[in-house]
Image (cartoon, rainbow, N blue to C red):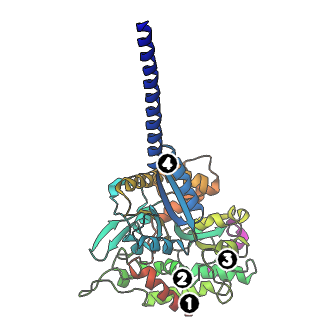
Amino acid sequence: MHLNKTWRALSRNLVILILVIIVIIAAVGGYLALHKSSKETTLNVITFSGQSADFIQYAANQFVSSHPGVKINVIQEPFSEYISDEETSLAGHSTQYAILGYTSTSAQDISKYLLPLNSSDFNMSDIISPQEDFGGIIYNVSSHSYETIGIAYETAIYLTAYNIKIFDNSTLASEFSSQYHMNFSPTTWKNWTVVEDVDNFLTSKGITKYGFLIDDHENHGIIDAYPAIFGYYYRDAYSLNHGNYSGIPGFNIMFEGYTLPGLNYPLPSFNSSEGVQALETYKTLVSYEVSPSSEQIQYGNLPTIYSSGEAPGAFLFITQLSSISSNVSSETYLAPLPGGYAETGTDFLGINKYLPASEQKIALEFLEFLVSPKVQEEAFIKFGKFPVSREAFMQLMSNTSLNTQQLEWLKEVYKASSNAFANPPNIPVTYSSLIPDFNDQVSII
């Protein structure tokens, strides 16, 4: 009897002990689950809205699938607003945005908020250097040294787009050649005079209402279009470039390619006979399109006007190709700028230097993933974005599933992107002062 009482007491105590252990385990499990969820890392990327942002989000979704506890949101804002919005946030050392999008010409403005990157973190030999150099790497005017502050995540260049139906017309080609003694095909154009003649030829015959479209918007269009034209004259003017046809990094072609003794910086180059020639060419090209007094051509509306079929082609950034209507886009082919070169217009992503070190590490891993050859291939196939990876270009150009037009686009973009030197400056005062001052003066002319 005594043993039974003792056994019952032990059994009761054992049950109580087991229940207590279960409660403790449940509590610990709940705590760990709560602790784990509270440790989820969320990184916000801010950039301008469009296909590029969609590509970044696509890559982010792939990245987080292999990184449990990480979430990446791409915040898309209008092109005219996102730079100022991120600067406002960063001025207070905010970590609201972990990864920051920026343009080539705003690089120096944003650089003070960005974490300096080690180029060894990326396979720089695979990155098309003219794309990275114009904004990913900046010249620090205070320390007189170069710094890597961001990575180019796609190739974006300013070149020639044209309607193949017009320029593959043998009758028109023969007539133009007979009249102007020049080749009609845009892939052969050696100078800007040919463009003026083509515009005159096509509009005078009523084949198109306008000539080749070119940006003339006084906000940001002029600073894109003028250097593209001026690059031809600058390259051949030794008195301006002194053998450095792309200018001094940071100052680029709108400044001389050398610094005079006694000065700290090069002098502007466009205040020259070559600069005036470029301006006269620019004015002639604009005269063959809709009058700026009624509608200025800019990044947003150029694809729409070209899509109307009223122009034979346009000088544009390849990022605008996705905005051209499908029927016209299918007839659009690409060529370098007249003379065989291009202008860079790449956008970049950098890392907020105010982030905790653990988040900086994840952000860097994502940027490395974003520019990897496989992801860069998918950028073109799924989003029409041209890769910044050389290996991705090679793989795509050997992809037999791509059509003739896609392969031709890839070939011309790859060739032109490696000779993309006709760039405006990105010294600190460019975005805030030089662009508006230059644009205002040119728009008056």
Q: Residue 236, relative to residue 391: is it above or below?
A: below
Q: Pick the quarter of the image with the N terminus.
A: top left
In this picture, which residue range is highlighted in magenta?
Answer: 164-181
Residue topped by disc 2: 222
Which element carries disc 3, helix, strand or loop?
Answer: helix
Tell me which numbered mark, 1 or 3, is placed earlier along the sequence: 3
Instruction: Where is residue 227? Give x, y as percent.
Output: 48, 79
Q: Residue furthest left?
A: 262
Tell me which numbered mark, 2 or 1, is placed earlier along the sequence: 2
Q: Is residue 53 magenta?
A: no
Tell me which numbered mark, 3 or 2, is placed earlier along the sequence: 3
- Classify mark 3: residues with Cα within 10 Å, few (<14), some (14-19) or many (20+): some
Tell me which numbered mark, 2 or 4, is placed earlier along the sequence: 4
Tell me where residue 445 sits by quadrant: bottom right
Residue topped by disc 3: 176
Amino acid type at circle 1 is Ser
- Whether the residues at callouts 2 and 4 have beta carbons within 8 Å, the answer is no
Residue depth check, mark 1 versus mark 3: number of the one nearer the observer = 1
Residue topped by disc 1: 443
Q: Is residue 178 magenta?
A: yes
Q: Is residue 403 left or right of residue 277?
A: right
The secondary structure making up most of the magenta span is helix
Residue depth check, mark 4 versus mark 1: number of the one nearer the observer = 4
